[in-house]
Image (cartoon, rainbow, N blue to C red):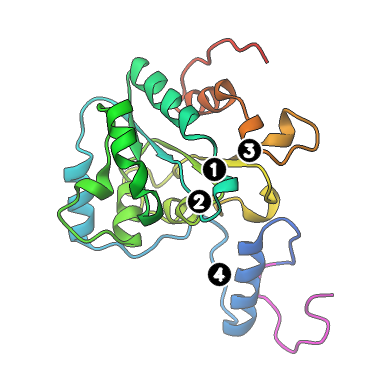
């Protein structure tokens, strides 16, 4: 019924109740009459940002796992304590945690650096101006990401991929109060974990247990999951 009164209709997309971005692309197709990206659309990233991402996250023999602890609404944030626990566990198992902090999360920088001094903070360590394009370039250096329902999740999903072209970045997105089907990153490797997966009807994101997130990361890295009690 979406296109019933419109002379223009999408070239390939159909109305989806699942994804806001898919419906947006359908509107773009209708206006342009050209097929829009199905998933994993790439932002244009400059060579300078690519080089800076490589400098910030060089090859060190460890897999980089991004953690995005913030969101525009703090009620959408998995607790900072659990993020710290996740970073420590990742480091203990031979991986390198990478915290992506936006302007609203700068107040967490010192606390996190004290709690996990081994972690990387690329947007705080860059010699260039922070931007969505630098964040997208950084995503090409990552092996996995854990985010809340936030804009950064979509930027990471749109990050430029070079040698990983056949395997987009796996983005594990945590949901509490918001609709996961509509707001999940538009990528073929979106892994959604919701509070209601563990507590029926829950909208409290902290009902998502630590082990569920850690095991999702390990699984996406192609490694053996740890035993859990839930």
Distance between mark 2 and mark 3 Cα atoms: 12 Å
Label 4 belongs to which residue?
Answer: 36
Distance between mark 1 and mark 2 Cα atoms: 6 Å
Q: Secondary structure at mark 4?
A: loop
Point out the tag, 1 or 2, that comes first from the N-terminus.
2
Mark linked to residue 205 = 3
Pick the residue in front: 55 or 97. Answer: 97
Distance between mark 4 and mark 2 Cα atoms: 28 Å
Q: Is residue 100 visible?
A: no
Q: Contact, CB < 8 Å: mark 4 with mark 2?
A: no
Q: Quadrant of residue 100?
A: top left
Q: Contact, CB < 8 Å: mark 2 with mark 3?
A: no
Mark linked to residue 166 = none
Mark 2 Cα within 10 Å, few/some/many (few <14, many 20+)? Answer: many
Quadrant (top left/top right/bottom left/bottom right) for the C terminus: top right
Quadrant (top left/top right/bottom left/bottom right) for the N terminus: bottom right
Q: Position of residue 53 (x, y in %)?
A: 23, 48
Label 2 belongs to which residue?
Answer: 71
Which residues, given as a range, are shown in magenta?
1-13
Mark linked to residue 77 = 1
Query: Which tag is nearer the camera, tag 4 or tag 2?
Result: 2
Point out the tag, 4 or 1, that comes first from the N-terminus.
4
């Amino acid at each position: 019924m979406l296109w019933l009164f419109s002379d223009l209709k999408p070239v390939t997309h159909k109305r989806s109740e699942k994804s806001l971005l898919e419906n947006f692309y359908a509107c773009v197709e209708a206006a342009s009459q050209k097929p829009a990206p199905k998933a994993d659309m790439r932002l244009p990233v400059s060579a300078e940002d690519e080089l800076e991402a490589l400098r910030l996250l060089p090859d060190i023999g460890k897999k980089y796992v991004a953690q995005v602890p913030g969101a525009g609404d703090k009620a959408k944030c998995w607790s900072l304590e659990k993020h710290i626990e996740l970073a420590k566990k990742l480091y203990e198992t031979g991986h390198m945690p990478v915290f992506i902090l936006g302007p609203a999360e700068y107040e967490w920088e010192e606390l996190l650096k004290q709690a996990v001094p081994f972690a990387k903070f690329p947007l705080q360590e860059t010699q260039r101006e922070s931007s969505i394009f630098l964040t997208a370039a950084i995503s090409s250096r990552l092996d996995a990401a854990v985010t809340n329902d936030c804009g950064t999740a979509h930027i990471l999903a749109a990050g430029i991929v070079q040698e990983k072209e056949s395997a987009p970045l796996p983005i594990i997105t945590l949901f509490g109060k918001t609709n996961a089907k509509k707001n999940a990153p538009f990528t073929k490797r979106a892994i959604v974990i919701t509070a209601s997966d563990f507590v029926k009807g829950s909208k409290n994101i902290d009902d998502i247990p630590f082990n569920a997130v850690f095991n999702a990361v390990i699984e996406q890295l192609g490694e053996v999951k740890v035993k859990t009690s839930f």
